[in-house]
Amino acid sequence: MNVKYWVMVPALSLGIALPLHAENLPAFNLTIKDGRYSPEQVEIPAGQKIKLVIKNDGPGPEEFESSDLNREKLIQDGKTAEVTIGPLNPGTYKFIGEFHPKTAQGQIVAK
Amino acid sequence: MLATAIIVFREVLEAALIIGIVLAATQGLARRVSWVSMGIIAGVAGAGLVAWFADAISSALAGVGQEVFNAGIMLFAVLMLGWHNVWMKRHGREMAQQMRDVGQAVKLGSRSMYMLAVVIGLAVLREGSEVVLFLYGIAVAQQDSPGLMLSGGLFGLLSGAMAGLLMYRGLLRISSRHLFTVTTWMITLLAAGMAAQAAGFLTQADLLPPLVQSMWDTSGIVAQSSVFGRVLQTLIGYADHPSGMQVLFYATTLAGIAVLMRFYGSAPASKVQPLNAIET
């Protein structure tokens, strides 16, 4: 097999998969500023895929991290990032800002 | 300062452990120190570049550029690690026989070292770019004075490097008869763990389904976010509640490398012999 197929196949499958990614999921907003999240508790419906829309108001970059949810995402100063989570079982899922682990703490409550 | 040191340490740890394992796995290969150093230097330079372009990477591919980038890097490293194992199994004996012919041994050794140097470079790049961004964040927020920040960062870096050194020294205590078998296994587990992490990133990007949200939950025993959990994550791919897709990637990589080593690992000419023939 030609080498270029090894590049083309993943590239094409990405191209097909990415539009699917843009599907309309219920969005829940989260802001991080001065090393703190607001709100610190986000209630979401259980058993349903949702997206967290996280805005970083700085200063500096932050990493949204949740080992409960298996998620980590770097967000630059002044930028907004989306993280898809779920469907989750009812329960509480903690998250932190890895660059301010002492103060940037919050939780997702799935009901 | 301590907070800075701890965060830098956690980031450096993974790369340092990988370097320790590679150094042990390449005992006796020619010019390995210069290959490893080149991998580290290229990784540090790459980390700076990635941090600089972090914003562009993040917003690429409809917002999942970061996940695809990380997954791509890890899967590439998995290929290199698997290739190294197969390659060493195939040529290890040949190399041992030709050790007297120094030029040939250097040439053969370089080929395998090249792949591992790439793995090191990628590990340093990935973890290093986070360190750069984190330190940049502290500088912007003016949380610490520059002096405190630097000493914290340096302390974290040195402690991480120390962990890598301990890993290396520990492995060298294994008798040379078994060292090669042990490092081959460790590299296989390292690759399987990276594949599982890559699956995690692709699931986060919503490009792969999780299959099962959580196969088990051992976070009460060893939390993945603890330092010990992180060491285990690097070494054997430990995850305290992996998704079905992650377990699938892990198992497939493990089996894939084992099968490839079995079928393509035999030396072309004569009967295969256990790989420990490599030590001289």
Image (spheres, grey):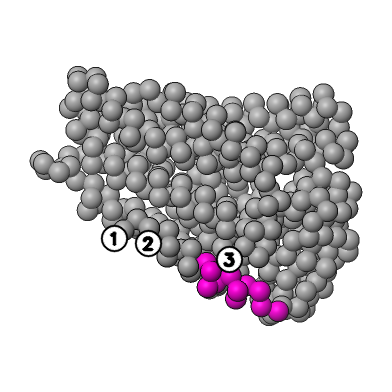
Q: What residue appears at the point 22 percent right and 53 percent down from the top-left corner?
A: B263
The amino acid at mark 1 is Met
Neighbor class of circle 3 (other Cα within 10 Å; few <14, some 14-19, many 20+) is many
Residue B105: image quadrant is top left
Residue at image point 19% right, 25% down: B98
Q: Secondary structure at mark 1?
A: loop
Assess disc 2: are there few (<14), some (14-19) or many (≥20) residues with their C-alpha within 10 Å of its C-alpha. few
Chain ID for label 2? Answer: A
Question: Mark 2 and 1 residues: CB-CB less than 8 Å, in contact?
Answer: yes
State whether residue A34 is above or below residue A31. Answer: above
Q: Chain of mark 3?
A: B
Residue annotated with mark 1: A1
In three-dimensional space, the C-alpha distance between marks 2 and 1, rounded to whole angstroms, equals: 7 Å
Residue B27, how many percent across, how many down? 36, 27
Instruction: Answer whether residue A28 is magenta in the image.
Output: no
Per the rendered image, the range of residues in magenta is A14-24
Residue under numbered circle 3: B203
